[in-house]
Image (spheres, rainbow, N blue to C red):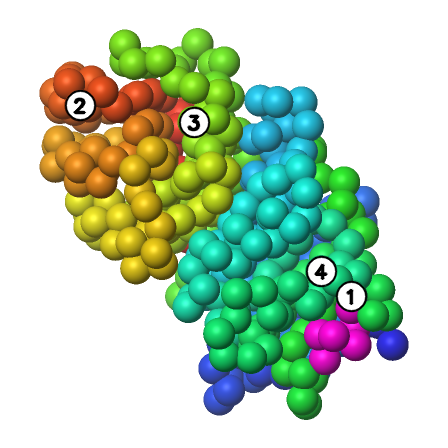
Amino acid sequence: MSQKLSEIDITYGENPQQKCYGIDMATGVANDPLAIGNFELTQGANPSFCNITDLDRMLQTITHIAAVYFLNTGKTPLIAIGAKHGNACGVSVSENWEQAVHNMLNGDLRAIFGGSIMVSFPVDGEIANELVTYNSKFGKRLLDMVVAPFFTPEALEVLQRKNGKLRLFANPALATLDKNSLDCQKRDRYLRGGHITQDNYTNIFDFKSPAVTKNAIEMSEGQKSSLMLAWAIAVTSNSNTITLVKDNMLIGNGVGQQDRVSAAELGVKRASAAGHDTNGSVAFGDSFFPFTDGPEVLAKAGVSAILTTNGSVKDAEVAKSLTDRNVVFWTVPDNAGSDSGRGFYAH
């Protein structure tokens, strides 16, 4: 029997030796259908702390994808996300579920093993079967969590795992995402001896913004669409992040690095390790490049378009380097304000 997350016991904290005391619903969220407590556990064992935080992280990613596409194209595509430890390892957008699911899984077939999936469309028996068998070389793919608007009885049967180890969460609001689906509540974080509060992540990149600076290389509509996806993934991944996307499919997410060059190298490395050709891909970086070394890593890998911020003393040098390599290079200001494009996350 389905239960709302606000009503069930969380098995343990971030580690088994840590007790979890459940979800405290914030005030002012009664009208938010996507509030975490409104998701229902429809099958599987009670979740752990990490299941809940992974769900929240994927929710940030999927709503940012919906928002950027809706703002810039007037519609929301079908979305499929695969994640590990909160960071996306496979993401795809498409007009049909099959392509979205297949490209999401192909993003990183190794990383998605034991991972979590969130989709913006209902899961029936056929889709459920693809989630656990498509391109799987070792039998039925093991997953920890699948989140969807709802599951059919056939899907529930396909997605059963021993001891309820595959948890299924449903929320019908996932099927109607748009630019108004972002979480606008203030974010509160515990610190030793207190709390720190900030506004939520509600900036959406607008390709028509007058704040955008462009080099002389023309951007194609295909590059623009893939950059929307790269932006939404990167700004909801652990900084520093450089995200590579090709044909509306995540191919390499260089997350959690302490310098931009390493983030670029990791993005390219993860794409290559997953069997992807980086030629013709696009990249988004969550802050500016202080030198030309990071962009050169991307350009040498065949990245054809880069979107990031400006604010470095080397901006002109970086732009010239990429223009000389025939790479599209668009930037927006890194500084504070509504036009800021900086995408730091999860500090």
Residue type marked 1 = Gly
Residue type marked 3 = Gln
Residues at marks 2 and 4, CA–CA distance in whole angstroms: 42 Å
Can I make out residue 256 in this image? no
Above or below — where is 337 with respect to 35? above
Q: Residue 184 falls in which quadrant of the image? A: top right
Residue 58 falls inside the magenta stretch: no
Residue type marked 2 = Arg
Q: Earlier in the sequence, mark 3 or mark 1?
A: 1
* Residue 43 horizontal side relative to residue 79, left or right: right
Q: Which residue is mark 4?
A: 127
Q: Earlier in the sequence, mark 2 or mark 4?
A: 4
The magenta span reads 155-160
Q: Report the front residue among 254 and 225.
A: 225
Residue type marked 4 = Ile
Residues at marks 2 and 1, CA–CA distance in whole angstroms: 48 Å
Q: Give percent across and percent down for residue 265.
A: 21, 49
Residues at marks 3 and 1, CA–CA distance in whole angstroms: 34 Å
